[in-house]
């Protein structure tokens, strides 16, 4: 399902002027707090009326300023999951889930059972919200939204209030929902970990504007977006396939067009496709293939671009068999190595730097 968004709205001193499109799957809106991500989500949901622009699902307008179309929220068939579960405290989990059907009325026989199984809610059905953990509340909120039979699901930083274990728990269920239900999702986050694991399309926002949008791997590799993707968390995304498990050493061998990566503790079967985030700070460069080193990942490539210097460091984009990899090195090292577009190099990546937070299903 194609989502088209082009909206303009002034909110006090803040001006929103955002335009992007998503082709099903998960479209992630990424940016710092105050960049306008939630305002865009509210405009799609019908909770915020733009002053100009158009919002359409598969060509059907939800809002069109020129044509005078503005469907009320209850007619848009859009599910919304907020930062907090917002469950009804006096109802059981089962009743909270069934409450979602009042807004859709289209859930067929067995819909409740399917959602309960998908989100692992069977043991929680008779509990009240005050007896649930933060992660359990979010799973119930997601289930309630899905039982309204939405054409599109909006998720506004659903992991923001959770600790690390609960975040991993919810990410797993969102991945299952993405892969098994096929409901398109617009996912707001300021966490690259979440974006890389979930998103098909990445929309980078700043000060109410869309700086760039496109496939997550290509967008992450754009050098001009380095300042907006986080100095310490930015990097590249590699689409890889699990080729082998070394159970004795606890490593998985991942193959991609540019070569091989070894990573620890990969929870995927041989043949499955994964998305791997390699942080720029975890990549070193050499002009010659090094010998007798601890790093298992040595990838031959060519310098494609040099970014603008930031203090003592500079980002270097390396083309590794058609896959873009980013290395963050000191300006002193870049000068000493004579790094420039076209120079052959070897990119070195520590296996232990590719942790479970850096890997998601493609």
Image (cartoon, helix red, strand yellow):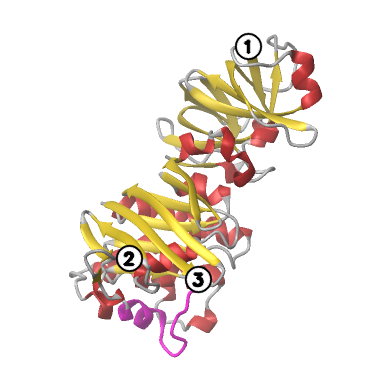
Is residue 90 on the magenta stretch?
yes
Residue 124 part of the magenta-drawn span: no
Q: Is residue 97 above or below residue 262?
A: below
Q: Earlier in the sequence, mark 2 or mark 1?
A: 2
Within 10 angstroms of label 2, few (less than 14), some, or many (20 or more) residues? many
Residue at 27%, 78% (x, y): give it. Answer: 103
Marked residue nearer the N-terminal end (1 or 3): 3
Element at badge 3?
strand
Range shown magenta: 84-99
Q: Is residue 246 left or right of residue 151?
A: right
In the rendered image, residue 173, in percent from the top left (x then y), is placed at 44, 57
Does the image show residue 215? yes
The residue under label 2 is 115
Q: Nearer the viewer, mark 2 or mark 1?
A: 1
Q: Residue at x 47, y 24 (%)?
A: 256
Picture quarter containing residue 314? top right
Q: Marks 2/3: CA distance?
A: 38 Å
Dot in front, 2 or 3 = 3
Q: Position of residue 171 (x, y in %)?
A: 49, 55
The crowding category of the residue bearing disc 3, from other C-alpha atoms within 10 Å (few below 14, some 14 to 19, many at least 20), is few
Pointer 1 local density, CA inside 10 Å: few below 14, some 14–19, many at least 20 = some
Q: Nearer the viewer, residue 101 or 308?
A: 308
Real-space CA distance between mark 2 and mark 1, rounded to the nearest whole angstrom = 53 Å
């Amino acid at each position: 399902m194609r989502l088209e968004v082009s909206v303009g709205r002034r909110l006090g001193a803040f001006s929103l002027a955002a335009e992007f499109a998503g082709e099903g799957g998960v479209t992630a809106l990424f940016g710092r707090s105050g960049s306008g991500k939630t305002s865009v989500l509210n405009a799609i949901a019908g909770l915020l009326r733009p002053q100009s622009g158009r919002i359409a699902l598969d060509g059907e307008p939800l809002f069109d300023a020129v044509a005078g179309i503005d469907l009320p929220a209850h007619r848009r068939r859009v599910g919304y999951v907020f930062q907090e579960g917002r469950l009804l405290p006096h109802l059981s989990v089962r009743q909270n889930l069934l409450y979602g059907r009042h807004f859709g009325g289209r859930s067929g026989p067995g819909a409740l059972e399917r959602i309960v199984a998908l989100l692992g809610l069977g043991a929680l059905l008779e509990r009240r919200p005050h007896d649930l953990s933060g992660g359990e509340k979010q799973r119930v909120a997601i289930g309630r939204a899905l039982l309204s039979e939405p054409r599109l699901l909006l998720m506004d930083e659903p992991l923001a209030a959770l600790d690390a274990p609960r975040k991993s728990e919810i990410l797993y269920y969102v991945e299952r929902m993405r892969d098994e239900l096929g409901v398109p999702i617009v996912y707001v986050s300021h966490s690259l970990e979440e974006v890389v694991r979930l998103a098909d399309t990445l929309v980078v926002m700043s000060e109410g504007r869309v700086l760039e949008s496109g496939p997550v791997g290509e967008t992450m590799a754009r050098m001009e977006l380095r300042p907006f993707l986080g100095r310490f968390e930015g990097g590249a995304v590699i689409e890889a396939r699990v080729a082998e498990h070394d159970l004795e050493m606890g490593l998985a061998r991942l193959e991609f067009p540019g070569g091989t990566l070894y990573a620890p503790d990969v929870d995927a079967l041989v043949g499955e496709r994964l998305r791997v985030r390699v942080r720029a700070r975890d990549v070193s460069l050499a002009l010659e293939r090094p010998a007798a080193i601890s790093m298992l990942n040595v990838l031959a490539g060519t310098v494609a671009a040099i970014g603008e210097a930031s203090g003592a460091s500079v980002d270097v984009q390396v083309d590794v068999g058609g896959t873009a990899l980013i290395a963050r090195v000191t300006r002193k090292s870049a000068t000493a190595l004579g790094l420039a577009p076209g120079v052959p190099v070897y990119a070195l990546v520590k296996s232990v730097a590719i942790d479970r937070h850096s890997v998601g299903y493609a």
